[in-house]
Amino acid sequence: MEEYILIDYVKGKLDPVEASKVEEWVALSDEHRATLENLYVLMFVGDRVKAQSEIDVERAYEEFKQRLATLSRERKVKRIPTWRRVASVAAIIAVLFLSGTFGTLLLMERNVEPLRITTDLGERVQVQLPDGSNVWLNTYSSLEYKQSYFPRVRRVNLKGEAYFDVAHNKSLPFIVANNGSQIEVVGTQFNVRCNDDENFLSATLMEGAILFSNPASGSDIMLKPGQELLFDKETRQVQVKELTHPENMVGWKEGRLIFENASLSEIAKTLERHYNVDIVFKDDNVKNERFNAEFETTDNIYQILSMLELTQKFRYEINKREIVISSK
């Protein structure tokens, strides 16, 4: 297993799939487990031990190994000053104790059930995460948050759409992950849309700053307030644009459906999620007709379609929960 992958695992930067691969690798042998334990001690625990006990753990440990090697070669015992012996023993005990603790924590970490929030079609919820961050989850979306015993980051996995008001914590960045892409913040307000049935991921920043990254495409882009980022999942191209009314992108949070130069196909997908219906197009050409409109989620879907139909660009028929749209 590559060291940089193990480092990202300890830092909490891997997605669930990659993290599972590391845990499977660790379970293969005691040597693998020891490698990860030592890395954790080196990265995360050693500095705390040094600060608390005022013992240079790394130096004492190296001295211990050197003395041990010398003793083996010369087959005789040298007297070591008392204070050095105490420092060395204390360092080794600390490392061994913390290694055992890490193994226990790793096992506990593996068995911790993540917090999962899901919404059905037509449902929206607001939740507060354990770190104090507030999240509004749009219809037909899911959010997964796993607490850690040794956190380096706060990480959530998102499918669908959500608005985040992240609690500020400079030492624990907040990461929103989706299929290899991630958005990293410290404390800010932003919206993320990453539906499985859409070929793009979008992020709209309201306050603060966010960093979007996708290792596969080499993307690493910082957003400013009022900007929207669009990431094409297929071509892996990134586009950033300035928004005149960024608040319209998060109107759904207050129960508003706002469409700005949106295609009928895009509108149909939104209506399907909010009203739990199936919309079928008989004519592909009508999918690209564009509209500017605003509705309330309390409006009846048939009222919405009837209002759009007044443009004379299409017509619709109703068959139970299926709506068929065709050209005029």
Image (cartoon, rainbow, N blue to C red):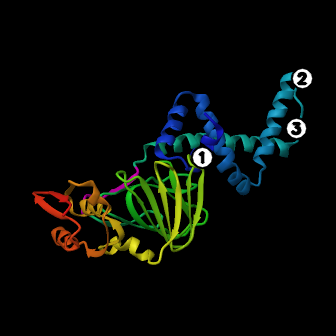
The quarter of the displayed image where residue 42 is located: top right
Where is residue 302 drawn, in percent x and y? 16, 68
How far apart are the two marked residues, 2 and 3, measured between alpha carbons? 15 Å
Mark-to-mark CA distance, 2 and 1: 42 Å
* Secondary-structure class at tag 2: helix
Label 2 crowd bin: few (<14), some (14–19), many (20+), radius 10 Å: few
- For this view, does 293 lie left or right of residue 228? left
Type of amino acid under label 3: Ile
**In the image, 263: left or right of 68?**
left
Mark 3 — residue? 80
Name the foreground residue: 184 vs 203: 203
Q: Amino acid at mark 1?
A: Asp
- Is residue 210 rendered magenta in the image? no
What is the number of callouts on the image?
A: 3
Part of the protein shown in magenta: 114-122
- Residue 29 pos. (x, y %): 56, 27
Judged from this view, the residue extending furthest toward the left is 320
Q: Earlier in the sequence, mark 2 or mark 3?
A: 2
**Residue 282: image x %, image y %?**
20, 53
Residue at which label 1 appears: 8
Residue bearing mark 2: 74
Q: Residue at x 62, y 34 (%)?
A: 34
Of the pair 315 and 4, the residue shown nearer to us: 315
Tell me whether circle 1 and circle 3 mark residues in contact (CB < 8 Å).
no
Residue 120 in the magenta stretch? The answer is yes
**Residue at image x 43%, y 43%?**
111
> The C terminus is located in which quarter?
bottom left
Residues tagged 2 and 3 counted as in contact (Cβ below 8 A): no
Q: Secondary structure at mark 3?
A: loop
Q: Position of residue 246 (x, y in %)?
A: 45, 75
Lower position in the chain sequence, tag 2 or tag 1? 1
